[in-house]
């Protein structure tokens, strides 16, 4: 019997499928001592997997529950705020319920290294915002942190089994990956890039109706006490799709960008039109319109030639071919960038003059001899016409000026949300701002624009950032966040209280502190 026969029989009723999946989970759990890592995205499919794991574990005698189950969730640090809160609350309740029932389940969040976050790559290194052809974000923000977690467990245990909420029939490419990595006669598949990791997808044969029949069935209460109707409401909008925890570079493409899902990053520029934030705004969370406005601006500036360097970070130039139509050299329209048409006399439709050369080396010589600064918004406006056709200078990273503008607008957005809605959000962490400053210094750039952006919007001296950051290192912060999640405490609120204590540590009279504590506790501090 092959994997197809084990799983895929559409004639089966949901109830039959559930009991078979519970049996399979039990069988694989008892099969060996390899720990499990469960990818939990907060979406319906991974929720179903965790639900069924609880169900299966309840049927196993306590003395046989020795194998560890790690439930991990990815936090890109630019998660859609409401979904992040939902995931935190679920992780916390999953952990607490498991503790009460003596189940060997632990919950973890995996985050990108500070050097690889969205803002550090964009503002620190000048990476253009990700799009369909240059989607640098998934590896750095999701796959690498998850792989690091898996490798750590592999180091300790030799091998691991990953449990994913993948279903057959979701997409042809996903089905192909599943087929290619299935181990005949087994419920496990090989992980496509980590040799000591295996994948178990218990709900392969579930269809969408099975999922909701299970989750919305009155007899099937959420084992950790959350309300599945909240989850269901996230899918009410037909445009909402899944954003699975991506742990495998080879299924990255089939997993899609998540930008059209309510479960992706709020700042996702991979999709042309945001659906995550607009869905929430439509259903009443109006303050998110500030984020949407910012995200749209960020998408618009991506291909603006004035916002990008005309050389790579290492100073190298490259040329990109452009079409020649109706006797005009055409720089095509891209996102909000308008089409530019240049005549053979070198004059474009805006009246600008372009220099035309017959060889790339001549164009480069011209750039070197002119006083043009390629590390600015200046465009040397050179065209090469050689045997490959017409080409212009390709675009490099965002200019430092633009990066400072991106930071300034981001902090302004954060401040606007506070002033207009009394909601405290941290759109970029202090650690990220310091890392950005470090990268600028390493590139020989002055950091005044970063300092100005910080001081003018947040109204406090930039120096404070060092005191606030140095209180806790990354590892301690992660541990603290995990402890907060496990105990149902708001992490950001907790950090604020520590900051307050730190600021007032030498005060003899501490009466005024109680008012500040109550302000913090009554504020709407939203985790982003
Ligand atoms: S949701 Fe968008 S920005 Fe976030 S990792 Fe996926 S593709 Fe990148």
Image (cartoon, helix red, strand yellow):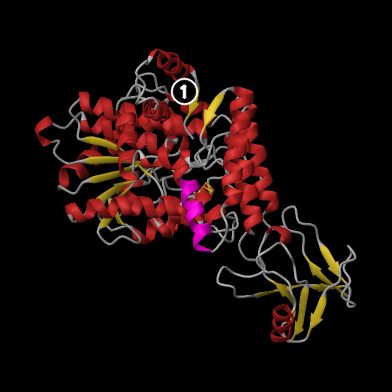
Magenta stretch in the rendered image: 432-443
Residue drawn at x 39%, y 18% as measured from the top left: 218
Q: Residue furthest left?
A: 63
Res 283 → quadrant: top right
Q: In the depicted view, which residue is nearer to us: 397 or 41? A: 397
In this picture, residue 306 sits left or right of residue 34: right
Residue 353: x and y in percent read: 86, 71
Q: In the depicted view, which residue is nearer to us: 63 or 139? A: 139
Q: In the depicted view, which residue is nearer to us: 279 or 28? A: 279
Q: In the depicted view, which residue is nearer to us: 274 or 303? A: 303
Residue drawn at x 13%, y 38% as measured from the top left: 66
Residue drawn at x 69%, y 52% as measured from the top left: 301
Residue 444: x and y in percent read: 54, 63
In this picture, residue 76 sits left or right of residue 95: right
Q: Is residue 512 at all visible to an observer of this figure?
A: yes
For residue 160, above or below residue 58 = below
Residue 262: x and y in percent read: 54, 37
Please name the residue that numbered disc 1 is placed on. 229
In this picture, residue 18 sits left or right of residue 518: left
Q: Main secondary structure of the magenta part?
A: helix
Secondary structure under the numbered disc 1 in the rendered image: helix
Q: Is residue 272 at all visible to an observer of this figure?
A: no
């Amino acid at each position: 019997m092959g994997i197809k026969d084990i799983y895929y029989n559409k004639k089966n009723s949901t109830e039959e499928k559930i009991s078979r999946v519970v049996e399979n989970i039990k069988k694989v759990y008892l099969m060996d001592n390899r720990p499990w890592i469960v990818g939990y995205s907060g979406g319906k499919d991974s929720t179903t997997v965790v639900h069924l794991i609880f169900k299966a574990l309840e049927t196993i005698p306590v003395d046989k529950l020795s194998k560890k189950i790690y439930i991990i969730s990815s936090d890109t640090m630019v998660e859609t705020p409401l979904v992040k809160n939902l995931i935190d609350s679920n992780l916390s309740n999953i952990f607490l319920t498991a503790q009460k029932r003596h189940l060997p389940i632990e919950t973890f969040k995996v985050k990108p290294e500070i050097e690889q976050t969205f803002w550090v790559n964009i503002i620190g290194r000048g990476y253009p915002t990700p799009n369909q052809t240059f989607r640098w974000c998934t590896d750095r923000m999701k796959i690498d942190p998850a792989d690091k977690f898996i490798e750590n467990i592999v180091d300790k245990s030799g091998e691991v089994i990953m449990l994913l909420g993948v279903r057959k029939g979701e997409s042809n490419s996903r089905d192909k990956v599943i087929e290619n990595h299935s181990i005949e006669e087994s419920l496990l598949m090989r992980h496509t890039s980590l040799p000591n990791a295996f994948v178990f997808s218990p709900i392969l044969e579930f269809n969408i109706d099975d999922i909701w029949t299970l989750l919305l069935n009155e007899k099937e209460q959420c084992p950790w006490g959350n309300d599945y109707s909240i989850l269901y409401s996230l899918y009410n909008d037909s445009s909402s799709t899944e954003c699975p925890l991506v742990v495998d570079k080879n299924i990255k493409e089939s997993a899609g960008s998540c930008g059209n899902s309510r479960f992706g990053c709020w700042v996702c520029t991979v999709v042309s039109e945001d659906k995550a934030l607009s869905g929430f705004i439509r259903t009443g969370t109006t303050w998110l319109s500030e984020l949407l406005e910012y995200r749209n601006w960020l998408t618009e500036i991506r291909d603006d030639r004035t916002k990008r360097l005309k050389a790579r970070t290492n100073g190298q130039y490259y040329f990109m071919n452009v079409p020649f139509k109706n006797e005009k050299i055409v720089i095509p329209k891209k996102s909000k960038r308008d089409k530019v048409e240049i005549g053979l006399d070198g004059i474009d439709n805006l009246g600008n003059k372009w220099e035309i050369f017959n060889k790339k080396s001549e164009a480069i010589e011209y750039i070197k001899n002119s006083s043009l600064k390629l590390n600015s918004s200046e465009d040397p406006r050179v065209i090469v016409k050689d045997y490959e056709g017409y080409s212009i200078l390709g675009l490099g990273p965002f200019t430092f000026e633009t990066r400072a503008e991106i930071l300034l607008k981001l902090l302004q957005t954060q401040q606007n949300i506070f002033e207009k809605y009394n909601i405290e959000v941290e759109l970029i962490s202090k650690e990220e701002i310091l890392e950005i400053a470090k990268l600028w210094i390493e590139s020989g750039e002055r950091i005044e624009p970063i300092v100005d952006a910080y001081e003018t919007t947040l109204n406090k001296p930039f120096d404070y950032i060092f005191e606030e950051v140095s209180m806790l290192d990354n590892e301690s912060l992660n541990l603290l966040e995990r402890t907060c999640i496990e105990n149902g405490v708001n992490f950001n609120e907790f950090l604020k209280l520590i900051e307050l204590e730190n600021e007032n540590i030498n005060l003899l009279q501490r009466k005024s502190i109680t008012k500040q504590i109550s302000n913090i506790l009554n504020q709407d501090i939203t985790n982003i």
